[in-house]
Amino acid sequence: MSASGTTIANYAPFIGVRYSFSRKRNRFTSVIATVSMLGMVLGVASLIVVLAIMNGFAGELRGRILSLVPHGFVESDSGGIAQWPQLKEQIAAAADIIAVAPYISEKAILGNNSTRRGVVLTAVDPQLEGGVSDLPSAMIAGDLDSLQEDGFNVVLGATLASMLRVVPGDYVEVTVPRLTVTPLGLFPRSKRLLVTGLFQIGAQPDAYQAYISLSTGQKLLGSKGKVDGLQIKTRDLFAAPEIMRALAADLPPSYVVKDWSQTQGSLFRAVKLEKVMVSLLLLSVVAVAAFNIVSTLVMSVAEKRRDIAVLRTMGARAGGIMAIFVAHGLVLAGVGITLGALLGVVLATNIAAITATIENVLGMKLFDPTVYFISELPADLQGLDVAMVVLASFILSLLATLYPAWRAASIAPAEVLRYE
């Protein structure tokens, strides 16, 4: 490359910037450039805000559901654990295990007068349950220790109690999938339970979960001293899969060891997949804005044909001309991406206040806690998400500039200057 060609190529970014902010551009070209820039701003900002909100929803979902779900489980493949106290002590002595508690779980039907609901009936030890879950702190009426009182008592989720139209002090009829032999034949086993408490975590378990004491569960379900398994809390929720794998290696093969990612993993994988799909949909908005740059640059190339021809006669190579228009397009996109990222970060970090303001102006509640389990939009802005949005937008913008830049570099100066 000649010295003059090298100089032109080195100054290509500066010429591209000057083209981007030139006041001598055609009015229609300026409008198209502004529209593409605004489209980039809206696309980037929307993508950042939606990703932050979905992160917030995932965090809320994980925190609320996993407040009742232990980090791990140990069950027997032979239908119950008879010597569970000894196994409990063995597991509690393992590394990184904080607490262990027994449980029995069965699907059942709860009824009150004409209302019937399918539930998950879980028998727990009230003294040990607080070590493996946040159930005691989730009680909004009564307390978990009431399960140990004389009689057959039950603690219900607040939403389930509302659907059954019962409050603490009322009775519900429970029917379990066990048969009672009578002179008249076989009948499903049923029992009246006294509602002694309500819990609420603000998630789906409020609508289907019921708790009874371990002794009540063994009598009602005919477990005869056995438990279905042991619930385990580890030192770290996210280290639970590794810890449970290490525990499985120390236990006999007759025991089945699971962690929360196996029992609840499908739910969180669905949330993650939803985040990916929404991201791709919103990225299409950014792509449309990015490819609007093609129109802007094509029109700019048509306007600058004479300038291109002059630069070529001065020694500019095709690569230098391409660099000018690539820089021209990236400057337009860069302004849109920067403004969009700033706007998205501001909106994401203040989304709760913005939602509250809209609710005050409209005089209505956008998110009814009884329907959505939340009262405001949660947001968790992550730097990696912002960086990925900016990088993806920049790559799409770069791709959009290549074709117009190539067209500009293909212009023959002799054809343009023939009649000058």
Image (cartoon, helix red, strand yellow):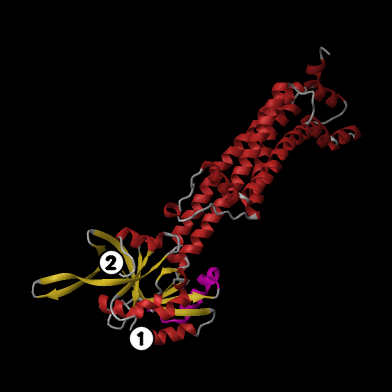
User: Which amino acid, by three-letter code, is at mark 2?
Assistant: Ala
* Residue 131 place in picture, x, y as percent: 47, 77
Q: CA distance from mark 2 to mark 1?
A: 26 Å
Q: Residues within 10 Å of mark 1 (few under 14, many from 20)?
A: few
Residue for badge 1 = 83
Q: Is residue 415 above or below residue 232?
A: above
* Residue 344 place in picture, x, y as percent: 64, 46
Query: At numbered mark 1, what does the secondary structure look like: helix, strand or loop?
Result: loop
Residue 223 forms part of the magenta stretch: no
Residue 11 visible: yes
Q: Earlier in the sequence, mark 2 or mark 1?
A: 1
Residue for badge 2 = 108
The nearer-to-camera label among 2 and 1 is: 2
Tell me the magenta residue range.
236-254
Q: Specify the principal SS of the magenta part.
A: helix
Question: 26 left or right of 381?
Answer: right
Which residue is at the front of the view, 239 or 411? 239
Query: At numbered mark 2, what does the secondary structure look like: helix, strand or loop?
Result: strand
Q: How many marks?
A: 2
Q: Residue at x 52, y 41 (%)?
A: 362
* Residue 234 place in picture, x, y as percent: 51, 75
Question: 31 left or right of 136?
Answer: right
User: Which amino acid, by three-letter code, is at mark 1?
Assistant: Gln
Residue 249 forms part of the magenta stretch: yes
